[in-house]
Image (spheres, rainbow, N blue to C red):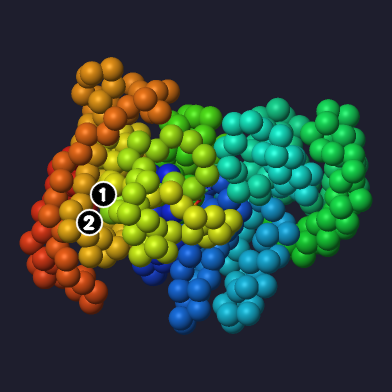
Amino acid sequence: MSINAIIGGQWGDEGKGKIVDLLSKGVKIVARYQGGANAGHTVYYNNNKIVLHQIPTGVLRDKSLCILGKGMVIDPIGIVEEIDCLNENSISFKDRIVIDYYAHLVTPIHKMIDRETELKSGNKIGTTCKGIGPTYSDKFNRIGLRMVDILNNNYLKTKIEERINSALENNEINKNSIDELEKEMKYFYECCEMIKYFIKDSFPIIYNNINDNILIEGAQGTLLDIDHGTYPFVTSSSCSSGGIATGLGIPGNKVNDIIGIFKAYVTRVGGGPFPTELFDEDGDRLQSIGKEFGATTGRKRRCGWFDAVAGNYSVKINGLTGVALTKLDILDSFKKIKVCTHYEFKGELISNMSSVLNNLEDIVPVYKEFSGWETSLENIESYDDFPKEAKIYIEYLSEILEVPIR
Ligand code: IMO
Ligand code: MG
């Protein structure tokens, strides 16, 4: 019986959904602790592609209970869309989804503010426009609405009217958009009604099962973490393992294994520094062979070589006990593969990312080059059967990350 966590090791989109799906077999509870509909976790179910944004991937296992923890920000309209998708795929979920009373509520106001802010900003973060930042702002400003407020219609409506008025007064939203907002609000209230059934206190559920198998599903990635990431080009939550304690109320000493998910190269979607980003043919090939498009926004992902400086930082911040390396096969046809081992900054070699987090635009990546395996990895089931060059690459990554690749 154990509690294990799956954490994004890079800038998101590492394949967390796929690994959670793999490891959730027989797991009693799968729980998310942060983020919201900005996540896009893609899994194939009976050959159908399913993209989950808020409901944990464990919902595909018919015995797992899925908890949306209080550290999340929940969009009821998105939940209804996901539920429709589950119904279309004949996936039963009725008594298997719990949305915590105290998770914060994303309303159409927050999504509108997110869009307006992005439009007006000269230094675009390139958010997913899912209302994540504005909702967490209201939370920390102590004016937020929570899921429990949905259970009290009058209170909810009064508070929402107040928030619309303050958004107008403070020019957070455009006065010309008010009709559009009112229309969205009508559908929003309908969705709130539809999801009432799932809103519960998750604390007793977690603690009655604390000695059972629990899998914790992270969203986004460590370098998008509000404290440890490439601020301000980050999301607004604690995506690293530290967020588990606050977002679910499961303290660090209860978590057994913390598995970091890393792609065999790196991608980033949205703005912000990206030391190993490629602007050449190799970058284009990673993008096209890896089908690197955002699962939530459809944007092309920026691509680059594996950044082991960032990777090692991520291992330490999260306390990773193991790594799952994904999409190695995307490198099948590459003659040469590179790994960034150091950053060069002002003539000095740097291996500690934290010291240059604020200067990443000015660092030069230093690479070690590897020979590619130039053969397909498809259908290989055992590590022993990997080509020699692939093993050398994996073993080097494990060594420089200082953690087993499992
Ligand atoms: P998963 O869980 C990749 C990025 C956005 C933007 C920044 C802030 O699929 O790995 P936000 O909407 O959160 O305020 O946007 O964070 N971002 C992600 N990038 N994968 C994600 O989630 C992401 N969630 C947010 O592109 O740069
Ligand atoms: Mg994504």
Image position, residue 298 (x, y; %): 56, 59
Image position, residue 249 (x, y; %): 52, 41
Q: Amino acid at mark 2?
A: Arg
Image position, residue 164 (x, y; %): 86, 39
Q: Amino acid at mark 1?
A: Gly
Q: Please tell me the numbered disc located at residue 406.
A: 2
| Proximity of marks 2 and 1: CB atoms separated by less than 8 Å | yes
- Residue 126, by quadrant, is top right
Q: In what quadrant of the picture does the C terminus appear?
A: bottom left
Pointer 1 residue Cβ closer than 8 Å to ligand 1: no
Image position, residue 259 (x, y; %): 32, 50
Q: Nearer the viewer, residue 295 or 106?
A: 295
In the picture of the structure, the residue carrying the numbered disc 1 is 322
Residue at x 58% of width, y 51% of height:
38
Residue at x 60% of width, y 36% of height:
124
Whether residue 41 is visible here, answered yes or no, is yes
